Image: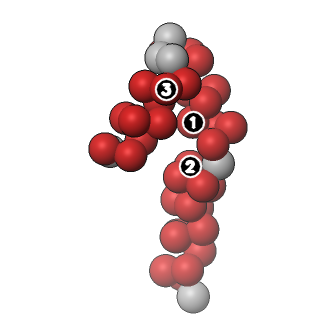
């Protein structure tokens, strides 16, 4: 059960585009580059 909880904690970062978009905006990255970087990463 603990493993599942850990996965859920890490999921939000990957599954929440809004969070990534916010980070990218803070970094000054354009949306297009953002998605490309995410795919490669």
| Above-or-below relation of 23 to 35 | above
Residue at the top extreme of this rendering: 28
Gap in angstroms between the C-alphas marked 3 and 1: 12 Å
* Comparing labels 2 and 3, the label whose residue is closer to the camera: 3
Where is mark 1, residue-wise? 20
> Which is more N-terminal, label 1 or label 3?
1
Question: Which color scheme is applied?
Answer: secondary structure
The label shown at residue 32 is 3
Counting other residues with Cα less than 10 Å from the Cα at mark 2, is it few (<14), some (14-19), or many (20 or more)? Answer: few
| Above-or-below relation of 9 to 39 | below
Would you say residue 40 is visible in this rendering? yes
Residue 34 image position (x, y, % from top left): 47, 29
The secondary structure type at the circle numbered 1 is helix
Seen in the image, is 40 located left or right of residue 28?
left
Quarter of the image for the C terminus: give it: top left
Where is mark 2, residue-wise? 13
| Above-or-below relation of 3 to 29 | below
The secondary structure type at the circle numbered 2 is helix
Seen in the image, is 11 located left or right of residue 38?
right
Asked if the residues shown at circle 2 and circle 1 are in contact, with their CB atoms under 8 angstroms apart, the answer is yes
Quarter of the image for the N terminus: give it: bottom right
Residue at the front extreme of this rendering: 32
The secondary structure type at the circle numbered 3 is helix
């Amino acid at each position: 059960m603990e493993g599942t909880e850990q996965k859920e904690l890490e999921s939000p970062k990957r599954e929440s585009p809004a969070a990534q978009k916010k980070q990218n905006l803070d970094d000054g990255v354009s949306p297009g580059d953002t998605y490309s970087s995410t795919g490669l990463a």
